[in-house]
Image (tube, rainbow, N blue to C red):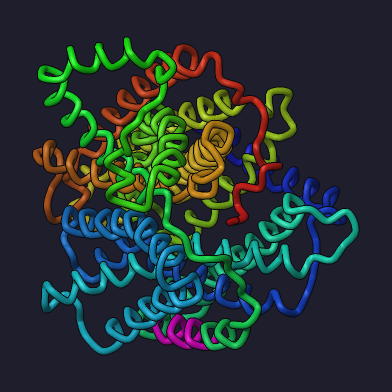
Amino acid sequence: MDLTLIISYSILGVLIVSTLVYIFCKRNYKIIYDHRLLFVIGLVFSRSLTYYAIVDNLMWYLVDHNEPFVRSTVLSNIQESLSSLFVIIMAQLADSYVGRFRTLMFSTTAFISVMILLLIFNPYDVTWLVVIILVLLALGRSGDNLLENVFNDLVNEVDKSENRNKERSYARATLWWNIASASGSISATMWVAMDSLGGAHTTWKSSFWTFLISMTATLMIFCKGHGLYHQGELTHRPIVIFFRVIRARIHELLKSKSQCSTNTSTQERSQERNPENEGITPKRSPLGEMDQGDRCYKEDLKVLPSLLRMFPLWGTFFVVSLISAVGSTFYTEQFDNLENNDKMPVQIYNVIQDFSCFAIPFLYKWTCFRHNQKLKIGVGMLCSIISCTFAWQLEIHRLKELRNFADEHAETSISFLWLVPQFIMLGFMEGLTESGLLTFFWSQVDKPVKNYGEDYMEIVMCLGKLANIGLMLILKSWFDPETNNDTRLDKYYRLLVCICSVNLIIYCCIAICFYKDTNQDHSSSHDDPHQHD
């Protein structure tokens, strides 16, 4: 395993150096500054600080407060699933009813409410209070996409440089977004989180006070720049279009079947007398009667086929989201008995994972097949197999050493660094599959829904995270309700390796056969899918 560790850290070093070199080479292309950006950057920082310190490690927080292992896993996955589901709901509210600014106010206020509840109450004395905290955390997390859209539009507005275009403005907004997020993650790891690297002896209560003050202050600054956040006319979201067309299609299908047996002869005679009417549908569609007319119906019919065409690919992404759910729960729990685990914050692994997720798309752009999005997704799925394999082998060694200790919380001789390879591969998986699938989505769908690929992907991620709970219930004999030391995570990881392998084979068949005539090798970033019309 020594060779594996050397290879993993070499890859991480290459990622760091290559990313810094890439940013330096593109500094004139990507860097822009305007004081108005600070209204949003502060809020991005405070949200990132909260994510890394508690939200992304909710299971670790629950276990630290004596919650059973299985219950902590289920609660953490429920919170993540709700976050993905609420992304669609919050987007619907922002673009159809109340606007992005008010929706973001509601989302951030939900975060602040959680911190107040955690400071005042002990959430484990009353079950309903736990439910409220999970829902509020999910509502807070679901506003990320909206905040990113607000920031992209703001950068595009303040960018007055020569040869400005929306693609360049988006690249500059992404750079500032990543800088603010990285600053929040570093601050959480160094000073705010439990067992922080900076040597500060923090407690959960002091961390909650830090989150509450920073979130409240940055929200007030964000509200100060209210006049800078411009949004176009509120329109119906494509998710409404999707369900509306499905309903109309079912309605038409049922109506046509009921009329088919009684009106066949009459329709044939009518067509013989009026041959010039062939190909013309004289009746209004049911959708036109239910909504505002045939124009809306025709637009929906134009969008729906391209959206349905993405379903096979989304089906394979389901397994990727399952592995992400495992990474945020079981991967973190493996840290419990490793050497020096009480001297390192568990958030360090989230930083490694997110940096790998951020860096690998830049590294992929330097390859000769950088425009092949199908291959990019396939490589990401291969990384999921490698990540689960690393976790499987580490768990075998961890359980083997624990059998020699009477204390279930005893510290093994396995270094905490052995967790790094599987988190690196987990970041590779997320970075390649999500960016590849999103770019592929932009190249496949029509413009009315091109802006909402991330929203639709969140639905698949919601189902994948719930699948982790389902597998735990099916394989409950492998999981000890109280502690992970008597849990057969090695068997579970081995099962995931098999599932990921089968999923990769299925993906290859779908990519080769179903999308073989698809012109997916051209990035659609020039169509500016991030900017709402």
| Quarter of image, res 472 | top left
Q: Residue at x 68, y 23 (%)?
A: 369
Residue 45: x and y, percent? 57, 72
Q: Is residue 413 left or right of residue 404?
A: right
The question of residue 216 being in magenta is answered with yes
Magenta segment, which residues? 208-217
Instruction: Spot the residue most to the front.
Output: 273
| Quarter of image, res 178 | bottom right
Q: Residue at x 43, y 85 (%)?
A: 212
Residue 59: x and y, percent? 29, 60
- Answer yes or no: is residue 14 visible: yes
Q: Residue at x 71, y 66 (%)?
A: 155
* Location of residue 250 with respect to 498 vertically, above or below: below
Q: Residue at x 55, y 76 (%)?
A: 43
* Location of residue 122 with respect to 418 vertically, above or below: below
* Location of residue 55 with respect to 236 vertically, above or below: below
Compare residues 327 and 490 and report the one nearer the observer: 327
Compare residues 35 and 71 and report the one nearer the observer: 35
Q: Is residue 77 left or right of residue 55?
A: left
Q: Main secondary structure of the magenta part?
A: helix
Q: Quadrant of the C terminus?
A: bottom right
Residue 217: x and y, percent? 53, 88
- Answer yes or no: is residue 413 visible: no
